[in-house]
Image (cartoon, helix red, strand yellow):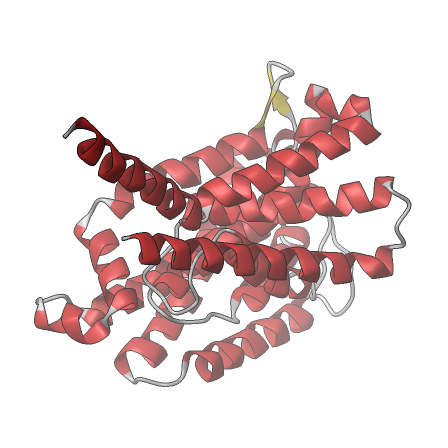
């Protein structure tokens, strides 16, 4: 009798472990730690506080952009306006710098407002008018890129000194300010995930028809997903401006595909209803760390995209394999 009870318990424990790994966060953390170990082996100085701050500063804009993209993907959508919002906010930060902490706060509010406005337009087009997300967000991306080019037709300008220095600095010489910003984003997400909006976001992404029958506002969930994503894109542009200290009307374009890659690496399903922001942020850190490892290994920069693509495919395939194993054992 003891044996008959122990076997099902062992099987349940194994299946739970597979499901946990298939969620994405555990898997991507493992990949990140392996890459970090390789980086430390190549360059022992990467264990220093300054090296971690450099990694955090480099990864923060992509991580925040990926977090915003995750909100839309969870609701079974796509958002190409990411590139336009990041470019536009970056240009505004460089062309209209506001000095001091008060100016930095006003600049942050402006970036969030721009992102929320673009997100609201996207949400209205996709959720209310039922336009295809790719077509609608492509249009808003082109509009934002056009406005960015009107404001600044070539790379230039200068971000305020307070933003450029303080937001890339370390508190007490240890904790990077950019890491604190990311922790705030994660904390807000953990709260939102337990609200009615968080629940409806997953429900709409998993099964829109069932969510509607359950009384969930599908239009509302999708609309606010785009608004939240837009605000995160604005924050991404704000942090990118702090890192580069200058403006570029095409600054957001490189982040677009990398953000989708970070979301996929984090295990968020592009069919909706599965995943989360934390794993996407770790996915962004993994992509940036991979670039550093490849550079330290002497790999030419134009091969970096190939390696990133291979890692992405392997991560997605392995995640799907674990998911199937978990379902078979259920």
Q: What x and y, as percent, mark residue 214?
A: 9, 67
Residue lying at 14% horizontally and 66% vertically, measured from the top left? 216
Q: What x and y, as percent, mark residue 230?
A: 44, 60
Position of 228 compared to 160: left or right? left
Instruction: Report which quarter residue 168 is drawn in.
Output: top right
Residue lying at 22% horizontally and 30% vertically, measured from the top left? 3
Residue nearest the observer in this picture, 244 or 284? 284
Residue 136, above or below 9: below
Position of 86 compared to 76: left or right? right
Residue 4, above or below 211: above
Instruction: Report which quarter residue 35 is drawn in.
Output: top right
The image quadrant where one finds the N terminus is top left
Position of 303 compared to 281: left or right? right
Q: What x and y, as percent, mark residue 311?
A: 66, 55
- Extreme residue toward the top, this view: 172
Residue lying at 41% horizontally and 39% vertically, measured from the top left? 186
Residue lying at 76% horizontally and 33% vertically, measured from the top left? 39
């Amino acid at each position: 009798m003891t044996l008959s009870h122990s076997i099902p318990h062992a099987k349940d424990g194994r299946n739970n472990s597979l499901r946990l790994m298939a969620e994405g966060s555990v898997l991507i953390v493992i990949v990140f730690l392996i890459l970090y170990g390789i980086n430390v082996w190549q360059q022992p100085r990467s264990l220093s506080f300054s090296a971690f701050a450099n990694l955090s500063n480099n990864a923060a804009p992509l991580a925040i952009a990926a977090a915003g993209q995750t909100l839309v993907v969870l609701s079974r959508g796509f958002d190409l306006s990411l590139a336009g919002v990041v470019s536009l906010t970056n240009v505004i930060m460089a062309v209209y710098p506001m000095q001091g902490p008060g100016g930095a706060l006003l600049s942050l509010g402006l970036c969030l407002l721009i992102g929320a406005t673009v997100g609201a337009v996207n949400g209205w087009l996709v959720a209310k008018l039922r336009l295809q997300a790719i077509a609608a967000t492509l249009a808003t991306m082109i509009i934002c890129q056009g406005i960015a080019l009107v404001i600044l037709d070539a790379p230039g300008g200068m971000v305020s000194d307070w933003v450029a220095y303080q937001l890339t600095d370390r508190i007490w010489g240890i904790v990077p300010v950019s890491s604190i910003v990311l922790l705030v984003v994660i904390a807000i997400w953990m709260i939102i995930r337990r609200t009615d909006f968080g629940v409806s976001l997953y429900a709409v992404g998993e099964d829109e028809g069932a969510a509607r029958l359950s009384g969930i506002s599908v239009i509302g969930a999708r609309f606010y997903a785009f608004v939240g994503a837009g605000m995160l894109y604005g924050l991404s542009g704000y942090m990118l401006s702090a890192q580069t200290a200058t403006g570029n009307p095409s600054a957001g374009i490189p982040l677009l595909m990398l953000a989708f890659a970070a979301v996929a690496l984090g295990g968020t399903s592009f069919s909706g209803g599965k995943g989360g922001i934390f794993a996407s942020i770790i996915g962004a850190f993994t992509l940036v760390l991979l670039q550093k490892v490849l550079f330290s290994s002497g790999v030419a920069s134009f091969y970096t995209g190939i390696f990133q693509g291979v890692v992405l495919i392997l991560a997605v395939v392995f995640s799907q394999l674990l998911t199937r194993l978990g379902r078979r054992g259920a």
